[in-house]
Image (spheres, rainbow, N blue to C red):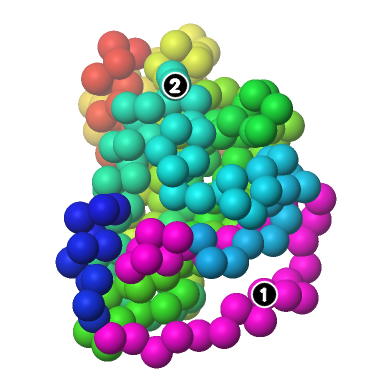
Amino acid sequence: MEKYAEQIRDKDFTRKSYSCFDEYPLLPSQALYIFDFQEMSIPYQRGIERLLGYSGEEFNFELFNHWYHPDDHDRYIHLLKLSNEWARKLKSKPFTVEASIDYRVRKKDGKYMRILRQTTVFETCFDNCAKSAFSFISDISKIKTNTNINLSLTDGNSANVIFEDKEINPDLVQFTKREKEILLKIKKGLNSQSIADEYNCSKHTIDTHRRNMLRKSACKNTVELLGFCTQQGVI
């Protein structure tokens, strides 16, 4: 971030007012803030002290350098670099692309909380480089209990995923004996109807197995599923 801040240090921009966030609805499990890349500062935040315990002065760029869980360091830094690279590449207009990442952060009391951070560009320089970003964070500790860290970039207009990087723990992916048999038949090129005929069941039953396997592996399609299962030695 320091390098990017130096690159845009002298670029002109039109400053926006933060007043639009004064009445932004927040639940007790949520907070928001603006991060200024050019000044490496957080000029505006709401709900941070209630959610994480940090005062306005304590919630700064220096805190970002060490508030994540030590076990998440390598993965978090990797995804942070990816998201920054995509932000510079896309040069998106404000509120058109959303970057979502979930990870563990340390609260002021020393306890860790898993948050979902949704970020979008708020201000841009005249050459469309991001000048500041708006981030909305939510406590998802009770919703997500595993330690995987995932990143996704979504087009705000179409809702299409532009890019994603998901972390999957293969030890947590368990396929049934029947699912493994179906995977092998899919690998051989058989479609759902052909597999159903072999098992004397309906195509709907085979399709249900396939959907369950996609859900378990967090894969988007059959090609990804076969690649994942081959890599992990499932088939």
169 left or right of 46 in image: left
At label 1, counting other C-alpha atoms closer than 10 Å, the crowd grade (few under 14, some 14-19, many 20 or more) is: some
**The image quarter in which residue 106 lies:** top right
Q: Which mark is residue 21?
A: 1
Along the viewing direction, whichever of 17 and 104 lies nearer the viewer: 17
Disc 1/disc 2 C-alpha distance (Å): 32 Å
- Seen at 44% across and 32% down, the residue is 66
At label 2, counting other C-alpha atoms closer than 10 Å, the crowd grade (few under 14, some 14-19, many 20 or more) is: few
Along the viewing direction, whichever of 195 and 32 lies nearer the viewer: 32
- Amino acid bearing label 1: Phe
217 left or right of 118 in image: left
Residue corresponding to mark 2: 70
Where residue 100 sits in the image (x, y, percent)? 48, 52
Name the magenta segment's main secondary structure: loop
- Seen at 55% across and 31% down, the residue is 104
Q: Is residue 34 visible?
A: yes
Where residue 85 sits in the image (x, y, percent)? 23, 56
Asked whether the beta carbons under mark 1 and mark 2 sit within 8 Å of each other, the answer is no
- Seen at 77% across and 68% down, the residue is 25
Where residue 188 sits in the image (x, y, percent)? 24, 26
Residue 14 forms part of the magenta stretch: yes
Q: Of label 1 and label 2, which has the lower sequence position?
A: 1
Give SS at disc 2.
helix
Along the viewing direction, whichever of 81 and 221 lies nearer the viewer: 81
Query: Which residue is the extreme one toward the front?
Result: 57
**The image quarter in which residue 76 lies:** top left
Magenta segment: 12-41
- Seen at 51% across and 34% down, the residue is 67
Residue 2 forms part of the magenta stretch: no
**Above/below status of 225 relative to 64:** above
Q: Quadrant of the C terminus?
A: top left
